[in-house]
Image: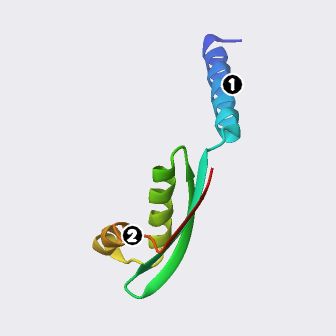
Amino acid sequence: MSRTTGTSLVFLALFFALVVYLSFHTTKVECEVCVTFQGQSNCGKASSETREGAVRSAVTAACATIAGGMTETIRCDNTPPDRTTCTP
């Protein structure tokens, strides 16, 4: 086996191990938030290591379908959620 082939196999094995490890890595907090923006409501779910991160990601997910364009998306992301439900 050539040196290049051996190096490639080691790299692929390490990459596969990383993918498996990250697949089984569980997050600590999952949140669902509902946001009303310009008369439209939508809910989004997200998970993260922290509650704040999960809420922020869930708001972004909820705003993705009710805001159009960058300016509206930023305004929607800064809108306080109507409802927030988190599980540890």
Residue drawn at point x = 51 percent, y = 62 percent? 58
Instruction: Give the position of the N terminus as an image quadrant.
Output: top right
Q: Label 1 to label 2, Cα distance in Å?
A: 45 Å
> Do callouts 1 and 2 mark residues in contact (Cβ within 8 Å)?
no
Q: Which residue is mark 2?
A: 80
First in residue order: circle 1 vs circle 2:
1
Q: Is residue 62 above or below residue 16?
A: below
Q: Position of residue 8 (x, y in %)?
A: 63, 22
Mark 1, Cα crowd under 10 Å, few <14 / some 14-19 / many 20+, is few
The residue lying furthest to the left in this view is 71
Tell me the number on the disc at residue 69: none
Tell me which residue sits at (37%, 85%) in the image. 38
Examine the rendered structure and indicate whether residue 36 appears above or below residue 29.
below
At which x and y percent is residue 66?
Answer: 44, 79
73 sits to left or right of 87? left
- Name the kind of residue labelled 1 in the image: Ala
Q: Which residue is mark 1?
A: 13
Q: Position of residue 4 (x, y in %)?
A: 60, 16
Identify which amino acid the numbered label 2 is placed on. Answer: Pro
Q: Residue at x 55, y 68 (%)?
A: 44
* Eye-nearest disc, 1 or 2: 2
Asked if residue 78 is positioned above or below residue 40 in the image, the reply reads: above
- Expressed as whole percent of the image width and height from the top left, the position of residue 13 reads 69, 24
Q: Secondary structure at mark 2?
A: loop
